[in-house]
Image (tube, rainbow, N blue to C red):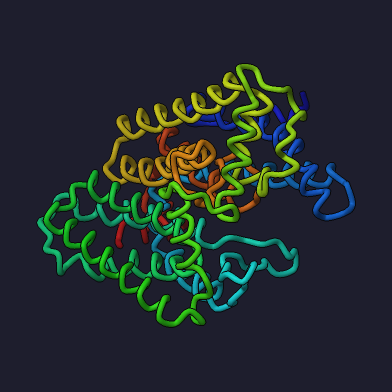
Amino acid sequence: MSTHLKDIFAGLQGDKFIWAIVALLALFSFMPVYSAASNLAYIKGDGNTIRFLIKHGMHLVLGFGMLYGVHKIPYNYFKGLSFIALPIVVVLLVVTLAQGTTMGGANASRWIQIPIIGIGFQTSTFAGVVLMVYVARYLAKIQTKEVTFKETLVPLWLPVAAVLALILPANFSTTAIIATMVMTLVFLGGYPLKYLGVVILTGIVALAFFVLVAKAFPGVFPNRVDTWISRIDSFTSDEVDADASYQIEQAKIAIASGGLLGKGPGKSLQKNFLPQSSSDFIYAIIVEEWGLVGAGGIMIAYMLLLFRITVIAHKAETIFAKLVVIGVGLPIIFQALINMAVAVELFPVTGQTLPLVSSGGTSIWMTCLAIGIVLSVSAKRKAEPTKEESELNPLDVLSETI
């Protein structure tokens, strides 16, 4: 091992169990992604599966580079960074929504192209991480204060409402996950329950109003509400809709044929029929190839990650540290459980990926960003600069003043 690599490994700080779990999930992901890539190569018409493997590897390398860099940042700096990043997130969401991209006749304006390199970036995933840090920062700030609902409207609920409203038209599932995680964090942060009830009721009314408007003016948000309704109907109704249930039926066939030990790596048959086999439904491919043992191993890995996140939050030295670990860590586990639940038909189709395992750059990068923040807290990277150091660290000054 070179001296440079030794220096990098020596610089890994924070919870070693999390480092190990994340590394194992990332290494394992190469096998199901490469296996499922044959379907993508067939669709592209060139039969080249290696390029999908290389692309996935590059996403992981960039993600782990981001994770390494973020975990070196003192965690209290994230207060100031979230305050700065939130307006940027709103602008990115507006730009993304304004693109008006359609896919199969439905509004799918979820991505923007990064200039020069031309890579697609899903802004809603980044918005979720930034918003959770921002909410954690605000809750920590008011922890020792008696606040009224009116006092929290602008600094807390206005940013939350703006982000959710900008994501909703194109991505209901992500909106629902972020809203659920925000409510969970706010509840754990000690926000008065009577105010929280008002917020939830207002959110339900706002969602109902959006559905009515979308149904009345279908040209504004093409087919999105109809898509949500058809997915829920397909999940709850006894009548089978062939088009709506095709993905889940193929996933169930893959799972049913997996058995205890599976067919073996790369031997999946359903990857040739299952759309999004390398991303949204990769868990079904894992069950088919690795059986109940592999499926259980993946689930155990995420449960261990949840356990370590809980331990880190419990041992954190400050209220902000506790809340930010829960705020950015819990959505990773929640998303993983939803992905697995969709594959076994315990949940309607949502389009959520399996963190660190599914292909897709944005999902990998934002998961690594969130884990980097958790590791920063576990390493107790809380900056306590001298006056001279504060002058060199404006983010630290900002985080202490806002």
- What's the residue at 83%, 49% (across, down)? 42
Q: Which image quadrant: the N terminus? A: top right
Q: Which residue lies furthest to the front in this view?
A: 239
Measured as percent of width and height from the top left, residue 310 is found at: 35, 31
- What's the residue at 77%, 27% (across, down)? 2
Measured as percent of width and height from the top left, residue 319 is found at: 26, 43
- What's the residue at 55%, 78% (across, down)? 98
Q: In this view, does 51 lie to the left or right of 346?
A: right
Measured as percent of width and height from the top left, residue 289 is found at: 69, 27
Residue 376 visible to the viewer? no
Closer to the camera in the image, 107 or 156: 107
Place residue 20 in its image quadrant. top right
Q: Is residue 108 left or right of residue 388?
A: right
Q: Which image quadrant: the C terminus? A: bottom left
Place residue 11 in its image quadrant. top right
- What's the residue at 44%, 27% (across, down)? 303
Closer to the camera in the image, 16 or 264: 264
Q: In this view, does 146 lie above or below 26?
A: below
Count of marks, rendered view: 0
Q: Is residue 389 left or right of residue 23?
A: left
Residue 378 visible to the viewer? yes
Q: In this view, does 14 lie above or below 364?
A: above
